[in-house]
């Protein structure tokens, strides 16, 4: 079928494995080629569509498919972010893609994605209203992934009169969770997946966010931008050289976590803790701030059962992270601030829009998904010991929103998984991804896991953006080579675009980290060796 002929195409309900009321193509137009080099966008047919719910009160799933005129016979689905609510840019690049390599569409892939089954309001990816409708909750939890995939494949086969030869998924954060959910629940659909900083244990992460939000809301507990800079300076002073070179990055994060204590650390020859523990300005931290920061680092355990089996959430690597320093002048720093601690302290009953991203996100989730009441004061929910009716609802949600860790069926059919996470991520903790990887080892053993999974941790990289080490990696080529040519990923390299543009580091197989080799160029990955 031509692009024009796709307009109005009905997508029958039986084309999708999960229950819907069918779908349709609402628009299709030929988009001319544009751009040059790696950023070139080839001529393609851009399709818009909708998948109708079973419940007439539930929102549609809105989706898009980009169909290149010159198709490579492969497909790639993009993941979303936060609570989704909008369709990812399917003509662009995947999370942290290499800037000198073509985008998936530029390589000839047919690409597609959806809004996960609801349309966001002014809160964007933090809009939690979907939590009021059960079908919308199920869609966000993962069902929209399957429905969108099936509908998109139906359209793709109508366009090309051919089935795809390989199917890949790529996403970060919620998109990383979606990658892991897809390969766990529908392993036969996917040949490979790329999961950056995946929020796989979603409900545990949200409960930890509630714990942290309430900690930061305590009087005097919220550090401003200057105090965040002072903490970063103290962390680097104590830990930067642990990897053999002072380069503004902490590579031996585990040793730093074991030895750094904000209550006893020094910065510029002075105590990091303010005299007497009282707030004394940006050059030091008060006891209230240190307590909140320790809560971020320590994590939280829950005193009630979750259907997902999770019992807590690990802390994040706070020491050495950019918690949102507003005085840094780079194009990505506003995003860093937005996704970290924001510019306003969490408060109730009205959570400021510029409070920490996680505080706004969790406030919406508690109101709509847990309490079912837009006027509920979210701080009344104790994430450790919630009231019985809330505990039961949270447990129920955990069984839907969390990704399972048994991906043996995906492994057995030859699927390949690439995992990556920045060590300075304070929105989704790299320690949580370590737990995911460790569970794979416990289930399958090292040899089996090595046959289909690689996990890399990147020093200095935060949540999708960093002014210190903005990581990029040609992960799609690595995945293609592994799936299609049986060439295992070796000597993979990540390149910094912003902190020190062009600086490279080796991607070390977890749990290894990059240690500097004396005499080498600190800008070059070849000057580092992977050690445990």
Image (cartoon, helix red, strand yellow):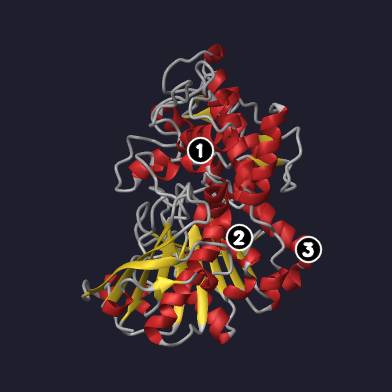
Nearest to the observer: residue 326 or residue 121: 121
Task: Give the residue pinned by disc 1.
Answer: 237
Disc 1 element = helix
Image height of 174 relative to 272, above or below: below
Residues marked 2 and 3 touching at CB (< 8 Å) = no
Disc 2 element = helix
* Of pointers 1 and 3, the one earlier in the residue sequence: 1
- Please report the residue visible at 48 percent of the width from the left and 49 percent of the height from the top: 58
Residue 84, x across and y down, in percent: 45, 50
- Please report the residue visible at 66 percent of the width from the left and 54 percent of the height from the top: 434
- Please report the residue visible at 71 percent of the width from the left and 36 percent of the height from the top: 392
* Of pointers 1 and 2, the one earlier in the residue sequence: 2
Q: Which mark is residue 181?
A: 2
Tag in front: 2 or 3: 2
Q: CA distance from mark 1 to mark 3?
A: 40 Å
Q: CA distance from mark 2 to mark 3?
A: 17 Å
* Of pointers 2 and 3, the one earlier in the residue sequence: 2
Q: Which mark is residue 443?
A: 3
- Please report the residue visible at 42 percent of the width from the left and 33 percent of the height from the top: 229
């Amino acid at each position: 079928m031509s692009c024009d002929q796709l307009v109005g195409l009905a997508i029958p309900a039986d084309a999708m494995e999960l229950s819907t009321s069918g779908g349709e193509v609402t628009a299709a137009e030929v988009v001319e080629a544009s751009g040059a080099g790696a950023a070139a966008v080839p001529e393609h047919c851009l399709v818009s569509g909708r998948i109708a719910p079973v419940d007439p009160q539930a929102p549609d799933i809105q989706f898009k498919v980009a169909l290149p005129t010159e198709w490579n016979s492969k497909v790639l689905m993009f993941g979303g972010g936060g609570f989704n609510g909008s369709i990812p840019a399917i003509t662009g690049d995947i999370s942290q893609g290499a800037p000198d390599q073509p985008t998936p569409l530029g390589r000839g892939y047919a690409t597609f994605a959806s809004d996960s089954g609801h349309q966001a309001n002014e809160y964007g990816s933090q809009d939690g209203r979907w939590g009021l409708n059960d079908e919308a909750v199920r869609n966000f939890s993962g069902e929209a992934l399957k429905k969108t995939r099936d509908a998109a494949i139906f359209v793709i086969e109508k366009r090309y009169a051919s089935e795809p030869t390989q199917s890949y998924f790529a996403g970060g954060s919620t998109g990383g969770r979606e990658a892991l959910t897809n390969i766990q629940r529908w392993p036969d659909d996917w040949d490979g997946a790329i999961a950056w900083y995946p929020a796989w244990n979603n409900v545990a992460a949200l409960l930890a966010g509630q714990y942290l939000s309430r900690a930061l809301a305590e009087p005097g507990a919220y550090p401003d931008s200057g105090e965040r800079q002072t903490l970063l300076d103290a962390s680097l002073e104590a830990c930067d050289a642990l990897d053999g070179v002072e380069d503004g990055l902490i590579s031996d994060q585990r040793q730093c976590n074991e030895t750094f204590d904000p209550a006893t650390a020094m910065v510029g020859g002075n105590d990091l803790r303010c005299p007497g523990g009282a707030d004394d300005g940006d050059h030091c931290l008060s006891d209230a701030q240190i307590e909140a920061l320790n809560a971020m680092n320590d994590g939280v355990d829950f005193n009630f059962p979750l259907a997902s089996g999770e019992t807590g959430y690990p802390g994040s690597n706070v020491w050495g992270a950019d918690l949102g320093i507003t005085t840094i002048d780079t194009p990505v720093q506003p995003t860093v601030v937005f996704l970290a601690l924001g510019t306003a302290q969490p408060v109730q009953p009205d959570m400021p829009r510029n409070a920490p991203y996680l505080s706004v996100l969790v406030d919406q989730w508690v109101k709509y998904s847990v309490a079912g009441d837009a006027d509920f004061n979210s701080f009344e929910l104790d994430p450790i010991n919630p009231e019985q009716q809330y505990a039961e609802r949270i447990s129920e949600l955990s069984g839907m929103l969390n990704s399972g860790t048994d991906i043996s069926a995906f492994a057995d059919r030859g699927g390949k998984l690439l995992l990556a996470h920045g060590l300075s991520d304070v929105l989704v903790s790299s320690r949580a991804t370590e737990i995911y990887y460790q569970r794979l080892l416990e289930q399958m053993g090292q040899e089996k896991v090595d046959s289909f999974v690689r996990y890399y941790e990147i020093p200095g990289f935060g949540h999708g953006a960093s002014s210190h080490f903005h990581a990029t990696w040609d992960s799609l080529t690595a995945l293609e080579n592994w799936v299609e040519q049986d060439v295992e990923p070796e000597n993979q390299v990540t390149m910094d675009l912003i902190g020190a543009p062009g600086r490279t580091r080796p991607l070390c197989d977890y749990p290894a980290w990059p240690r500097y080799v004396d005499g080498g160029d600190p800008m070059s990955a070849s000057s580092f060796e992977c050690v445990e």
